[in-house]
Image: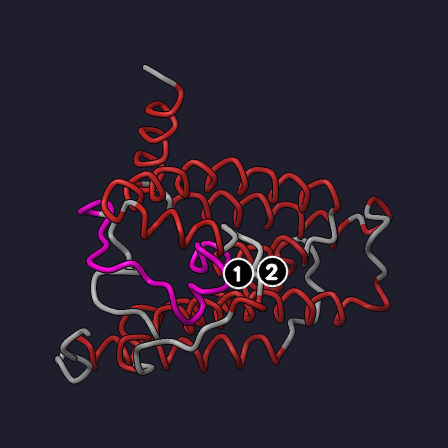
Amino acid sequence: MALQEELESQGNWLFRYRSFLPIAIVVVGWAMYLRRELYPEEFPLFLPDYEHLYLAVAMAVGLLGLAVRVYTVGFSPRNTSGRNTKVGQVADTLNQTGIYSVVRHPLYLGNFLMWLGPALVTANGWFILAFCFLYWVYYERIMFAEEQFLRKKFGDVYLQWSFRVPAFLPNFSNFVPSNFPFSWKKVLKKEKNGLAALFLIFCLFDASVLIFKPDHQPNLLLIGLCLGTGVLYLILKVLKNSQLLLEKDR
């Protein structure tokens, strides 16, 4: 098999199982976080007096990633920018406005920032670098497969768009307002779990320290945010199941 077809095949396979990568990141990140709490002297990047600052920066990065996803999904038309795990690649139209006028893969940029947050809170430079490298290798193939699909479907239109717009690092000077209105209902249906999952991860990281350090003082703010976003998730889940959040997609 030629390298081009092999990379496309690998990308399509990784696309179907891309939800498992965050699990591995969280498990290893949790182990690094616990070691940071137990042996802070092994982490030259970690200064205990600024622990709250580390957490704030990590959470801000994660929330920025969620915001990128929310913006992308909210302005996207039907059968684009979605979770197409079961059916593979789907694209009825080629997005070229809004966030797609500054970066070709905004959802994967959002994913990267969301999972970079838990990686940063470990304060382990090698783990952070390893995460970035793994994410690049993993998603580069997925992006390659997606772009092969789009190139075959949209031809010169895709080539002209890809020539102007970078793949992963945004170029804001290219920004063109979206052709579609923002849909909060679509965001709540598709992205309702992101906020709860983010705070749950940070809260579990912090609470798990009690297993090894019984005198550890849990972060009450994190607990409150975790409970609040968890309740919000359950409410939205009930509304979705009761069809109150149904909306004809654009």
Q: Residue furthest top?
A: 1
Disc 1 to disc 2: CB gap under 8 Å: yes
Q: Which residues are magenta?
A: 86-109
Percent position of residue 7, x then y: 39, 28
Question: Mark 1 and mark 2: span between their CA atoms?
Answer: 6 Å
- Could you tell whether 41 is left or right of 232 in the image? right
Picture layout, residue 168 above or below residue 233: above
Q: Position of residue 243 (x, y in %)?
A: 13, 80
Residue at 72% across, 40% down: 126
Q: What residue is shown at x 25% (from left), y 69% (from top)? A: 77
Q: Residue 103 in magenta?
A: yes
The residue beneath circle 2 is: 117
Res. 215 mark: none
Q: Which image quarter is the C terminus in? A: bottom left
Q: Quadrant of the N terminus?
A: top left
Q: 189 or 170, which lies in front? A: 170
Where residue 123 appears, x then y in whole percent?
Answer: 74, 53
Residue nearest the viewer, comparing 198 with 218? 198
Mark number for residue 114?
1
Q: Was residue 220 drawn as part of the magenta stretch in this picture?
A: no
Local SS, label 2: helix
Res 216 → quadrant: bottom right
Q: Looking at the picture, how far across and down is residue 41, in whole percent?
A: 86, 48
- Secondary structure mostly taken by the magenta-highlighted segment of the chain: loop
> Image quadrant of residue 239?
bottom left
Residue type indicated by callout 2: Gly
Residue at left offset 49%, top offset 56%: 165
Amino acid under disc 1? Met
